[in-house]
Every structure is written in C-alpha cells, then in structure tokens.
Amino acid sequence: MRSTWRDGERLRVVDVTSLGGGRFRVMVDDVALDLEVQRMGDGRFRLAGEEGTALAQVTVADGKRFVRLGHLDFVLERVAGGSRARSSRAPHGGLESPMPGVVTRVMVQAGDSVKKGQPLLAIEAMKMEHLIRAPRDGRVRTLRARAGDMVNGGVLLVEMEGGDG
C-alpha cells in the first residue's frame, strides 16, 4: 500500500508490501527495507531487519502520526492526494482503512452483491478488530487487500458500485 507523508518540509513516499509471516518490504523514498514486525501493543512495534533491531512507537492524533524510532522522533502528516478523506468512505464508492492495521479477514469477493451494513473485511489495530461494512446496497467492484496485508490508515481497501453514491 502506497501513501505520502509530510515530514517537516519534506515529502516521503512510503510503500508497504506484506511478505507473509509478519515480514514486510517497506520502501521509503525508494530505499527498501525488509523488516520482521512484531506488535507489542499500545502502538509499539519491534522491528528486525538486516541492520539490527529497533523499537518503534506510533501515536495517532488529529491525522498526524507521532513516531519514535529508537531515539529519533518524527511527526508525520498524510499529504492530500497521497491519501483520501479520514473516514472509511472514499469518493466514488470506495471504502478506506480507518487506521493502520493488519487485514485479518476478507468476507467478500469482487463481483459479490452486498447489503447495507454487511461486513466486508476486518482489520486488527490496537488489539481491536474493526469491521469495514458496506455503506449501502451494491456490488463489490474491486478488493485491494488480502488477509495478512498490513495497511495504513486512509488507504483504499474496497471499491463498490451501484446504490446511490
């Protein structure tokens, strides 16, 4: 999943790909890192890679991410155009991840007809399961996530068609 973040005056493009088994390839400004990620709760993560192990803590407040990586602190803010609105609904029938997490279940397939309120997929974030539900009757056009994928907040997960919006 790709997103763009403002880090002070600098823009950073981040692309996260699940490699399975808690491993991820993270591209930041075209620099690749292969990491094993272990959730420790309360927004804390243990990151292990070729260059060693680091602890990270992510705190979300008002659309910003306060990140402490080892002894370094960052304040990141999603860039307009690099993401969509901060709700679970995107323009043109899309549904977004409400926060960073891991997709634990996908309950529909592209082409499925769904009813308003029907669960489409589940995301685990902050030790809680969050269900993404159909906002209206319609059909699933595309799914952009699979079980096991790590997703950022605000990324498009499901596109719907039909219904009134």
Image (cartoon, grey):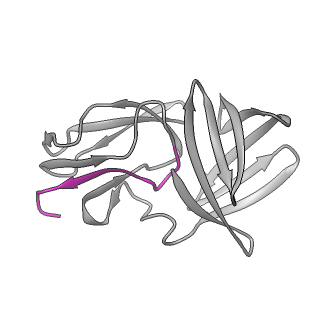
Residue at left offset 85%, top offset 43% = 70
- Is residue 22 found left or right of 89 in the rendered image? right
Q: Is residue 140 above or below residue 164?
A: above
Quadrant where the C terminus sits is bottom left
Q: Residue furthest bottom?
A: 9
**Number of numbered callouts drawn:** 0
Residue at left offset 33%, top offset 36% = 121
Q: Is residue 45 above or below residue 61?
A: above
Asked if the stretch drawn in magenta spans residue 152, the answer is yes
Asked if the stretch drawn in magenta spans residue 96, the answer is no
Residue at left offset 56%, top offset 69% = 79
Magenta-tinted stretch: 151-165
Instruction: Return the x and y of residue 164 as percentages of the image width and height.
Output: 12, 63
Instruction: Return the x and y of residue 125 as percentages of the image width and height.
Output: 52, 37
Residue at left offset 69%, top offset 58% = 30
| 10 or 70, nearer to the observer | 10
- Is residue 103 found left or right of 92 in the rendered image? right
Instruction: Return the x and y of residue 2 as percentages of the image width and height.
Output: 53, 55
| 127 or 24, nearer to the observer | 24
Instruction: Return the x and y of residue 92 as percentages of the image width and height.
Output: 26, 65
Q: Residue furthest right?
A: 71
Determine which quarter of the picture holds residue 13: bottom right
- Is residue 10 found left or right of 151 in the rendered image? right
